[in-house]
Amino acid sequence: MAKEEKCPPCKQIVPEFMSTYGDMVTLLLCFFVLMFALMTPDDHKFDMAASSFQLAFNGVLTSMPTIPIHKEVLVPRLGGDAQNKRIAADAAMKVRDVVQQDNLQDAVKVDVTDTGIAIKIADKVSFDAGSAKLKPEFIKVLNQVFEVIKQTQGQDIRIEGHTDNSPINTPTFPSNWELSASRAAAVVKYLYQNGEDPKKLSAVGYGEYRPVAPNDTEAHRRENRRIEIYVEYLKKEDKKVIK
């Protein structure tokens, strides 16, 4: 009688421990998903983490979602010097914190730009109508904001004055150009008198010609009457000229 041939033993393809290891990894994943679902989110930490990820992948990803630091603040766009942009984002959040402490969120807005930060201050806390004299509350805001800015030294500080389209014709201010330029110059003069390097400071008046809203209502005109402070953190040689 012929002998039965036995099947040769099957070759072991996957190590035996892999089944236990796979179960453990799956259980760990479920555990961390559960922990994440039960956690209380911290918007501030999330903003910081998301901003860091974008800066870490600078030049690798073509686009990233914008992360709000404040309802008017944007994460810096790709391109340029990543370290200086990280400094700008940090400065913007510190300025935001100062603004929130004084409940001035509606009057003072902060943006992160391609080259630094922009601080927009409404005229209700900066100047009286038809005047270029700094209001006491505006001086307080400037002092607090520039305490933050001095901690992260920028390359240039540009002050822009803007008005609505309401005509003005006085011996001091024949037009809105003179009014906006005088307001910007008043801010520059105050900053210089309080220790800012005059080589970094510049002032420009745009009058009514760069509105952020149509001049059709009083609320919109109030939006257009503003001072904008631009703090640049990229060196001049780092800035690209777009032809």
Image: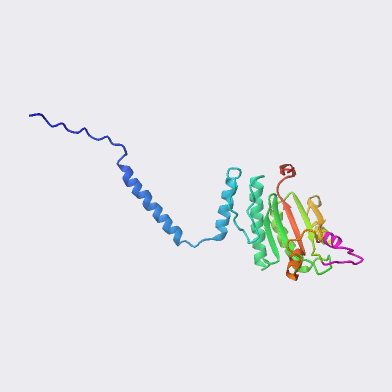
Question: Count of labels shown?
Answer: 0
Q: Closest to the observer: 136 or 131?
A: 131
Is residue 169 part of the magenta span, yes or no?
Answer: yes
For the point 29% across and 41% down, which residue is it? 16
Residue 9 seen in this snapshot = yes
Q: How is the image coloured?
A: rainbow
Kindly indicate the quadrant of the structure image that contains residue 59: top right
Task: Please tell me in which quadrant of the rendered image residue 79 appears.
Answer: top right
| Span colored in magenta | 166-181
Inspect the magenta stretch and tell me whether residue 224 lies in it.
Answer: no
Going by the picture, which residue comes out furthest to the top? 2
Residue 10 drawn above or below residue 97: above
Closer-to-camera residue (194/190): 190
Query: Where is 173 relative to 153, above or below?
Result: below
16 to the left or right of 140: left
Residue 32 position, x and y percent, is 42, 55
Residue at image coords 71%, 56%: 118
The residue furthest right is 171
Vertical placement of 104 versus 152: above or below? below
209 or 89: which is nearer to us? 209
What is the quadrant of the N terminus in the image?
Answer: top left
